[in-house]
Image: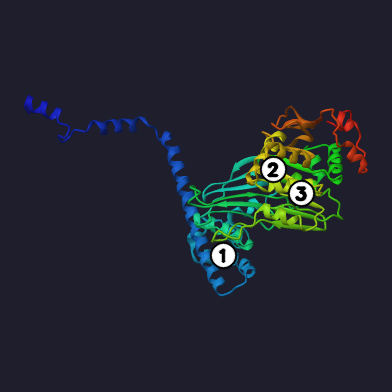
């Protein structure tokens, strides 16, 4: 071959017998990579393939069982009878199809189907778990729960959006509520009283979203709050006296701070021979007295009519001869009606509201009164507030997830245009333990409340040490 031909072949990468530069580099890279370096990647891919195969088989078996269940439901079979047969049906399918053997967890499939039939689908185990206080479904593939005050991502998932919608429908249908594109938000409750909020597309971009605030099977008592460190024995006796002496008490705090739990505990101090009317958006209070009338607001129907608001219920409750009016949450124009009720002979009323401090709660009440469209001067509104509310209990959810009463504040009256507040007890943080839990205690400020004589005239003797802090139980 001539010199010219050899030069031409060298400069032409497409010439037979030569390799492109990119291939050569890749080949060299493969030569420098040892088999031991590639093994972890191969192992990971193999594990993923095995998991995917198991998931596919799991879904396949579940679909086959689901079709058989639907067929039995069409034949009017009893739910309890079907539930008793599901495991037997799964065994028969696995016997007929060998590909399911060794790849499918039969018990898991059966449990999931039973939860769909008798409970609330995949989240049913979380609802039954006593350590879980909240369940949050963010679409079909992401479910969080609050466990011991901390948010935890669970391994629970739904098949698709339709599966989540079926669970929502199962929750709201027995209550006469509805959820669809024309009404994509709903508040409801579970049979045990747990509060449910659901919101669906097009408002929820991640898919149908469910938030469930669980309630304990056995309502908390004042002893439970003492054991939790929320308050002390002396303070419990003080609050007991305040409720029985018919003081008007407002529980304020942020979302999830434990307001409803505290309200429930306070409500149980009400004597059993009094008529109690409770008013809520979704019935949550669990009172132990005999004479209770529970009222619940109602959203508008599909035509936008028929709504019954908290304000309507507050007005109606005053015609029901109540000894006590307990309002689950004040958030709108009903504030004015509540204040008027407290100022016109309905002493001993209890209510909750959202705020970050007692002073904020008073400001919010002013705003809520103005929302009612009543043209009142600010001073007149403040006179109503100062004359109506005797005590504000401030709840807070601390950074470690614990819920504490952080202030108990007396509303002393109006001086000029300012409502005078006086803290009776305040929470003092002293540090954290080795587990990150906040260490602290409620301490008296040394000020005896102005309504102390009112407690004494009602027959309650509260030791002065409670307000000074000399008692050894403050620890």
Specify the label residue 373 is tagged with. Answer: none
Residue topped by disc 2? 353
Secondary structure of the residue carrying tag 1 is helix
In the rendered image, the residue lying farthest to the top is 3
Indicate the quadrant containing the C terminus: top left, top right, bottom left or bottom right.
top right
Q: Nearer the viewer, residue 28 or 399?
A: 399
Q: Which residue is mark 1?
A: 91
Closer to the chain start, of discs 3 and 1, is: 1
Alpha-carbon neighbours of circle 2 within 10 Å: few (<14), some, or many (≥20)?
many
Confirm or deny contact between disc 2 and disc 3 (CB under 8 A).
no
- Mark in front: 1 vs 2: 2
Q: Closer to the observer: label 3 or label 1?
A: 3
* Residue at the spot of label 3: 341
- Tell me if mark 3 has few (under 14), some (14-19) or many (20+) residues whose alpha carbon lies within 10 angstroms of its own: some
Question: Residue 152 falls in which quadrant of the image?
Answer: top right
Q: Which x, y percent locates residue 7?
A: 11, 26
**Residue shown at 55% from the left, 68% from the top:** 69
């Amino acid at each position: 071959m001539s010199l010219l031909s050899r030069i031409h072949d060298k400069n032409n990468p497409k010439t037979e017998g030569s390799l492109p530069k990119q291939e050569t580099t890749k080949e060299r890279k493969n030569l420098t990579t040892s088999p031991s370096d590639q093994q972890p990647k191969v192992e990971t891919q193999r594990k993923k393939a095995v998991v995917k195969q198991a998931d596919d088989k799991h879904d396949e078996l579940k679909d086959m069982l689901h079709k058989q269940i639907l067929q039995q439901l069409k034949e009017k079979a009893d739910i309890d009878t079907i539930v008793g047969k599901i495991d037997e049906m799964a065994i028969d399918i696995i016997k007929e199809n060998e590909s399911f053997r060794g790849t499918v967890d039969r018990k898991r499939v059966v449990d999931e189907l039973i939860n769909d039939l008798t409970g609330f689908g995949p989240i049913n185990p979380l609802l039954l778990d006593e350590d879980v206080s909240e369940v949050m479904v963010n679409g079909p593939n992401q479910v969080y729960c609050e466990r011991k005050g901390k948010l935890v991502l669970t391994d629970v998932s739904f098949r698709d959006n339709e599966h989540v919608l079926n669970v929502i429908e199962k929750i709201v249908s027995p209550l006469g509520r509805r959820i669809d594109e024309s009404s994509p938000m709903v508040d409801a409750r579970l049979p045990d009283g747990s509060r449910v909020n659901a919101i669906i597309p097009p408002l929820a971009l991640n898919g149908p979203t469910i938030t469930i605030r669980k309630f304990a099977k056995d309502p908390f008592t004042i002893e439970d709050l003492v054991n939790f460190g929320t308050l002390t024995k002396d303070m419990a006796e003080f609050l007991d006296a305040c409720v029985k002496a018919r003081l008007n008490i407002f529980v304020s705090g942020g979302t999830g701070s434990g307001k409803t739990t505290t309200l429930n505990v306070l409500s149980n101090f009400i004597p059993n021979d009094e008529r109690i009317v409770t008013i809520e958006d979704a019935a949550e209070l669990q009172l132990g007295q005999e004479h209770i009338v529970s009222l619940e607001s109602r959203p508008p129907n599909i035509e936008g009519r028929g709504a019954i608001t908290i304000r309507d219920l507050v007005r109606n409750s005053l015609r029901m001869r109540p000894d006590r009016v307990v309002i689950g949450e004040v958030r709108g124009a009903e504030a004015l009606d509540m204040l008027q009720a407290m100022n016109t002979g309905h002493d001993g009323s209890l209510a909750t509201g959202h705020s970050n401090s007692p002073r904020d709660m008073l400001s919010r009440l002013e705003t809520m009164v103005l929302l009612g469209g009543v043209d009142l001067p600010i001073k007149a509104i403040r006179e109503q507030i100062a004359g109506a509310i005797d005590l504000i209990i401030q709840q807070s959810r601390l950074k470690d997830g614990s819920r504490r009463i952080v202030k108990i504040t007396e509303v002393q009256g109006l001086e000029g245009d300012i409502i005078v507040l006086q803290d009776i007890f305040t929470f003092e943080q002293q540090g954290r333990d080795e587990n990150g839990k906040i260490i602290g205690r409620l301490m008296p400020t040394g000020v005896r409340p102005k309504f102390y004589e009112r407690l004494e005239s009602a027959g309650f003797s509260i030791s002065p040490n409670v307000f000074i802090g000399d008692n050894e139980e403050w620890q």
